[in-house]
Image (tube, rainbow, N blue to C red):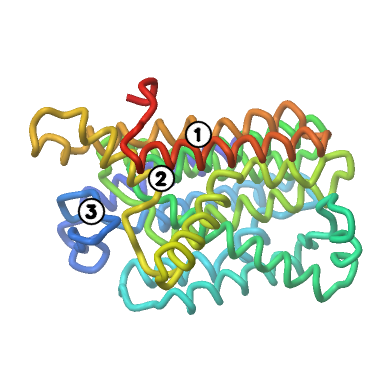
């Protein structure tokens, strides 16, 4: 717990200092683009919350090193593996000049490092025929890189409103912690709780007022960390179904896949092109925004903050079954299918202006 508390305090204080002295650096670190399709804030806000989380994790790693408690997974190694993705994201947050392809390559590099130094390779998904292919090292490596880089980018996609990505990540990490404790894998539990601590320090400043943003660096760091721990937990414990890892991350994964399909197939656009048709964007525009009488009132931070709990709840619809049935593949697969059906149904209903009354 000392490492978790240290991560929380350093992240909390670092965010405070970034916010307090933003007048000195906002011309470099601020999110000054206020008119984009995915922009829902109306003042310049620092977008380097990922730096505070990174400092929190670094401090936690030092605390664990000082304590010198034997563990088979070193926090420092996980953190080192995350650096290509996190630092490239932070570079984009500062320069605003790093392309999507370059950032994707950086996340793939982090995935390769995690696979090599942590043995975080995906070797089974309990699907007939696929597991035989994953037994081939080259295919396992490619699949792992796609999975880790994909989840890192998925968290960047859902990072659209105050507290959204960070709380979804906390929910997933607590689920990983619970199952890790159930199978006596203390190393995974510690690594998950340390990230929870760092995220909690950030969350208190990000929600509800949005005084600081995760930025690309924070989103990539969170996505990588959760992906690596999910893979490690399954690969190190044969009693855990690989579909636990899928279901814990089902909301960001399906949001990313659905966004790619929507842009490429339905709209005929590049998958990397930003739009305002994400689930969280629709909830803001067609549920939260309409709840305000004034045509201007919906722009304040309260309307922004009211959006996130809808997605926290949606994410929990997949995470709760994952916690309950982490050993049972067919129940997890069925739960995943029900989640996708629910997601698509609600999305279509909102698009057609037929939002269920309970959502309003």
- Position of residue 280 relative to residue 142, above or below, is above
User: Is residue 197 visible to the viewer in this orientation of the structure?
Assistant: no
Q: Of label 1 and label 3, which has the lower sequence position?
A: 3
> In the rendered image, which quarter contains the N terminus?
top right
Residue 28 left/right relative to 87: left
Residue 169 left/right relative to 157: right
Task: Please state the horizontal and vertical placement of residue 343, each as a whole percent of the image.
Answer: 51, 39
State which mark lies toward you, 3 or 2.
2
Labelled disc at residue 314: 1
Q: Are marks 2 and 1 in contact (CB under 8 Å)?
A: yes
Q: Of label 2 and label 1, which has the lower sequence position?
A: 2
Q: Distance between the Cα atoms at labels 3 and 2? A: 23 Å
Q: Are marks 3 and 2 in contact (CB under 8 Å)?
A: no
Q: Residue at x 36, y 52 (%)?
A: 277
Labelled disc at residue 279: 2
Q: How many marks?
A: 3
Quick one: 28 or 255, which is closer to the camera?
255
Instruction: Determine the image quadrant of residue 330.
Output: top right
């Amino acid at each position: 717990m000392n490492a978790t508390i240290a991560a929380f305090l350093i992240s909390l204080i670092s965010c405070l200092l970034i916010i307090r002295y933003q007048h000195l650096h906002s011309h470099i670190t601020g999110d000054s683009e206020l008119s984009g399709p995915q922009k829902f804030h109306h003042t310049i806000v620092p977008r380097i919350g990922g730096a505070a989380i990174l400092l929190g994790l670094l401090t936690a790693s030092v605390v664990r090193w000082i304590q010198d408690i034997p563990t088979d997974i070193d926090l420092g190694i996980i953190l080192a593996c995350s650096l290509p993705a996190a630092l490239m994201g932070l570079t984009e947050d500062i320069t605003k000049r790093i392309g999507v392809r370059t950032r994707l390559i950086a996340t793939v590099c982090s995935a390769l490092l995690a696979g090599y130094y942590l043995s975080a390779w995906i070797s089974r998904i309990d699907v007939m025929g696929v597991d035989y292919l994953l037994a081939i090292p080259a295919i396992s490596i490619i699949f792992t890189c796609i999975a880790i880089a994909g989840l890192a980018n998925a968290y960047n996609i859902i990072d659209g409103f105050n507290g959204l990505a960070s709380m979804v990540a906390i929910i997933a990490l607590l689920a990983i912690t619970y199952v890790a404790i159930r199978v006596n894998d203390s190393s995974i539990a510690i690594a998950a709780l340390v990230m929870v601590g760092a995220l909690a320090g950030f969350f208190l400043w990000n929600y509800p007022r949005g005084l600081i943003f995760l930025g690309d660096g924070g989103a990539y760091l969170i996505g990588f960390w959760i992906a690596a721990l999910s893979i490690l937990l399954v690969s190190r414990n044969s009693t855990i179904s690989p579909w636990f890892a899928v279901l814990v991350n089902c909301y960001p994964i399906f949001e990313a896949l659905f966004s790619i399909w929507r842009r490429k197939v339905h709209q005929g656009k590049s998958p990397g092109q930003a739009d305002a048709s994400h689930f969280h964007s629709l909830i803001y525009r067609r549920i939260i925004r309409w709840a305000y009488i004034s045509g201007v009132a919906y722009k304040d931070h309260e309307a922004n903050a009211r959006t996130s709990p809808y997605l926290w709840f949606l994410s929990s619809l997949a995470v709760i079954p994952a916690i309950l049935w982490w050993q049972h593949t067919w129940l997890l697969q069925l739960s995943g299918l029900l989640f996708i059906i629910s997601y698509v149904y609600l999305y279509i209903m909102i698009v057609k202006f037929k939002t269920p009354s309970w959502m309003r």
